Amino acid sequence: MRYMRAAARASTSAIAGPGKRAAGSQCAARLSGAAWAALLSLALVAVACWLVVSLFGREAREAREAREAREVRVERFALEGGGEFVLHEIDGLLTHEQCDRLVAAAELAGLEDAETIDNANAGAGAYTSYNPKHRTSRTAFLADGALPEVDAVARWAERLSGLPRSHQEPLQVAHYTERGEFKDHYDACDEAEEACLRLNRGSGSRVSTLLVYLNDGYEGGETTFPNVGVSIKPRKGNAVYFVGTDGSGAILGDSLHRGSQVRGGEKWICTKWTHLKAYPTGP
Ligand SMILES: O=C(O)CCC(=O)C(=O)O
């Protein structure tokens, strides 16, 4: 910095000295070389600073995210037949920026009416259908690797479930507008039903659900578990994780839940389901 200022001053006095043109122009050439060198070293210092700041900044941000996401509240509920139903609430699983990027990616991918299991038409080859009396939202699926945020959620699901990524469905992003809801349901699907057998694609039942709230500030829209009396208020970036089946794959009654009606505003979530066995992705 001091070098730069000295060079600038010298260069100004060379231009200002009318009686010393020849000497002055030589000096200007020499000094402009020095000024270039100064500028170059300044640019190098600036690049180095930028690298250090961005590297340390990213590390600090990641450390903060990991620290925040470690705030996990776990609630355990004794099951009638023994064992327990476990519900985790995880603060700050995603940052607000990550949530925004997932919403933007879903919008770009295009959202479609969310369907639910349709046993009535399973024989005719339609295993799901849009049933607005039960579920009113629009969804998009984001494949693994589509965005770093998609992988971040997948990693959390692996960590929480202890099952590999090959057992996961692609990430689903869902959007509810006012009065949108998803009435009481289980995420696990009883394979005694033809539709479930087809939908599970040979991967067994869904064993766990990781749901992340991608925005907040709307009215209603809580995720409610009526059998255990818990209602979770959505907070942007926070998540809910629970296991919906026992060791034998039987559905746990306590995992019954709903996305309560959005009474004002709009709600965005993403959901990662993990199956008992590898889940074949693709058409
Ligand atoms: O919207 C919610 O809070 C719950 C969503 C849900 O239950 C689901 O997508 O399976």
Image (tube, rainbow, N blue to C red):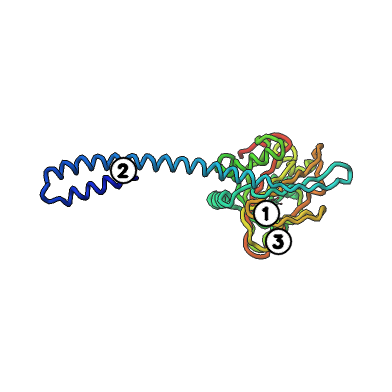
Whether label 3 lies within 8 Å of ligand 1 gets the answer: no
Q: Earlier in the sequence, mark 2 or mark 3?
A: 2
Query: Disc 2 or disc 3, which is closer to the eye?
Result: 2
How far apart are the alpha carbons under marks 3 and 1? Answer: 17 Å
Residue 233 sits above or below residue 63 on the image: below
Label 1 sits on residue: 130
On screen, residue 58 versus residue 79, left or right, reads left
Total marks in image = 3
Q: Earlier in the sequence, mark 2 or mark 1?
A: 2
Q: Is residue 110 visible?
A: no
Helix, strand or loop for disc 1: loop
Q: Amino acid at mark 2?
A: Tyr
Q: Amino acid at mark 3?
A: Gln
- Neighbor class of circle 3 (other Cα within 10 Å; few <14, some 14-19, many 20+) is many
- Neighbor class of circle 2 (other Cα within 10 Å; few <14, some 14-19, many 20+) is few
Q: Are marks 2 and 1 in contact (CB under 8 Å)?
A: no
- Neighbor class of circle 1 (other Cα within 10 Å; few <14, some 14-19, many 20+) is some
Write the residue at 64% across / 41% down. Answer: 154
Near-viewer residue (136 or 87):
87
On screen, residue 175 versus residue 15, left or right, reads right
Which label was assigned to residue 238?
A: none
In which image quadrant can residue 4 be found? top left
Give percent across and percent down for residue 62: 58, 43
Label 3 sits on residue: 261
